[in-house]
Structures are given as C-alpha cells and as structure tokens.
Image: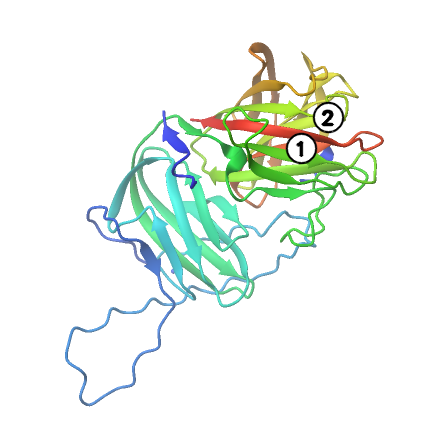
Amino acid sequence: MNRAQVVSLSCSLSLAVALAGCGGGGQAGTQSTQTPAPSQPAPPSSSPAPGPAPAPSLQPCSPVQVTWTPASVFAGPAAPAPPTSDCAAFPLTVSSPAGSGTLSLASPAHVVANAQPSNPILDMRVYVDGEAVFFTFNPAIDAQIWMAPGAHTMEVTAVDKKGANSATLLQVNVTGQGTATISQIQNLPGWQSCSAVFPPSSPRAGQLCAAGLGTAVSTMTPNQASPSLSGASAEFTMGGPTGYSNMLYFESLGGGNSVSHFSYDLYFYISDGSAPQALEFDLNQSFGDLRWTWGTECNFNGSGKWDIWDPLNEVWVPSAVDCNRFPSNTWIHLVWNFERVNGQTHYISVSVNGTTSTVDKYFQPQTGWPTEDINVAFQMDGNYRQQPYNVWLDQVTLVAY
C-alpha cells in the first residue's frame, strides 16, 4: 500500500534531546521527470551519423560542502540554498507528480522520487518556493507535500556524502488544499525506532532519542489480524533488562508549511494495563529551522494526568485532564486535536472513548531544528522493573488541513 492510496482530500525527555532556468509551459502528462547523470560528449567525427542531434546533458550542480556527522549537536544537516535549475551529478528520478510544463494538482501533492548516487546518500529534500519542507536520510522519497493554492516552484534535491548533488525543478499550480486524511498509518512502510539513543544502523547513530536508563528490547510487527479492529493492527512489544527503559517509534508522512490543524486519531490495546510507566503519542511539524512538537503522555505512575511537552524548558507539564490506567485487553479510542497558531503549538483537546476534555495550552516551538517533515510518534515507557507488555495500534489516522 503506497501513500497515494491512504490519502484522500476531504518525543519524556526524548523530545527535547530529540544552478539557473525553469521549466516551460504545457499540460501535465503521465511520464516521469528524470534528472540523468551527465554524459560524456562523443568524440568529434568528420562524418557524423545521420539523425537528430542528442538532447544536451545537464550540468552538475555546484558541490555542497558536507560537514555534518552524527556527532553533531544537530539532528541532521542544515538545508543549503536550493539550485535554480535542473542539474545532475547522478540520476535523480521524480515519478510523482509526473508530467512536463506546469503541473496542475491539489494539495497535498504525492511526491515520489529516487536518487542513485555513486557514493552513500547524505539526504534528500523537497523545497517549495525555496524553503525546505521535507527531509530524509534515505535515497528515496514517498511523501505528502502540503502547499497553499497558487503557483509554486517545487524542487527535489539529493546530496551524497561527498557533496555531489542533483536537483529536479517542477512548476506546479495548486488548485486547492482541502482536508487530507492519512489512514492506516500503523501499516505504512518506513517506521523508525530508537531506544535511549539512535541505534548504530541509523544515520543519527548515538544521538539521544527516547532517553530512559537503558536500552529497551522492543519490536514492531505490522499487519496483525488479532487483536484488531481493521484486520491489520501493528503490534509493539516492550521489555529488556533495565528498568525505566523506553522505546520510540515514529513515521514521517510528509511536509509543508501551509497545513496547521491536525487530529491524531487512533485505537490502542494493552496486554497488561498495569505494566507501562507511561504511553506517549506525539505529532511533530518542522520547517524554517523550527519544530512544533505536540508531545503528549498518559503518565500513569507520575502525575496521573495527560502531560504535555514544553520544548523550550524541556519539561513535561501536567495538564488538568486526568489519565488513569487503561484496562487490559480492551480497545481504547484516543483523539488529540492540535493546531499551529501565531507561531505556537496549541493543544486544543483530548478525547478518550468519546469523552472530550479541553486542554487549551500553548507553547513556543523548538528553535534551531535543521530537518523538515511532519511525523507521528508512539513511545512505550518501561516501569522500575521493566515489566513486559505489548500494545497494538489500529486505525491510526492523521487528519490535516
């Protein structure tokens, strides 16, 4: 199941310490847009073969100076100024949106791209009108990009670890931005996980992640038939040798600066309601060196409230809403409503099994955040004896407009 099929128009401490020219006019088609690697010109010949002249090859993009490593205090490399024309040091293919000339589309746009650098990839990004709105360490993009109605230049870029890079520019006309629903997120590919720190396999290896006092033993298995409401839940296990160890799971869905209202709607089912220290459900939006974090946790063994995250002071703040332990082996329906307003995160309300409570709290965003995306997260916290438990998530949905 790709992201186009699931979209319809209608980090606990972990969160703190986690080049000239444009395309011409025309109608959208069905072909993909590809930035090929620059080719070598054929040697001169006194008797050239008959036929049409080959299309000119693209020039390499200006090299990018690569200084970022996981030892950096930053989550990733900062966005460089984007190129102003198509250019290529290696193949970069944009298969969605597809076509030539000015492409007419609705927001969010489904962006699918693949890079094939000769050296290991550093990152890929999507820019809209020169501002980075989506980032990944992977050599491929499959993301929803929100844009305000009107004409925009969208750029897809890829950079390898030696600074070679490629870029493809698309001229788009956004016909409208409605309410987008991304559903069954629990079964989307690309979920990432980390315990106290990011694991050695991660580009952010060693950076602080879910904090806690040790490394949790945890797994995620999607597409579980039972227990399930949809027939395809995702199972998360929790354990390990050290008490107060945590595990964070997160899924990047896309990016954009034109979307600001969110509803994070899901069902969860706990094998042993007495076991978790806390359960955490988060949403993050980042662009322009800022990250708006809506961090929430049901703090069973602490405040007994729904705690919410203050990123500037790096503390959990108990809300006025009680959060008691949930029964074992019972589906719980949770809905959080958030918005980004006047540059702040606004926690609007929380609903548990249909009972809605007003939260109405505002916080400033985290500054100096160098990567861009919109992601949802789920964290399992272990208690003092790291009592094992499992949680199933189902019908995980993000509504955004």
Q: Which residue sits furthest left?
A: 50
Residue corresponding to mark 1: 379
Q: Which of 126 and 49 is in front in this view?
A: 49
At horizontal 72% and vertical 42% (from top left) the residue drawn is: 195
Image position, residue 343 (x, y; %): 53, 28
Q: Could you say whether the residue bearing mark 1 is in a helix, strand or loop?
A: strand
Is 151 rendered above or below residue 230?
Answer: below
Image position, residue 398 (x, y; %): 49, 28
Q: Nearer the viewer, residue 328 or 63?
A: 328
Image position, residue 103 (x, y; %): 27, 44
Q: Is residue 343 visible?
A: no
Image quadrant for the C terminus? top left
At horizontal 53% and vertical 66% (from top left) the residue drawn is: 119
Is the image coloured rainbow, by chain, by secondary structure, or in one colour? Answer: rainbow
Instruction: Pick whichever of labels 1 and 2 is earlier in the sequence.
Output: 2
Is 45 rendered above or below residue 389?
Answer: below
At horizontal 75% and vertical 16% (from top left) the residue drawn is: 304
Q: Could you say whether the residue bearing mark 2 is in a helix, strand or loop?
A: strand
Marker disc for residue 278 = 2
Q: How many labels does the image show?
A: 2
Amino acid identity at mark 2 = Ala
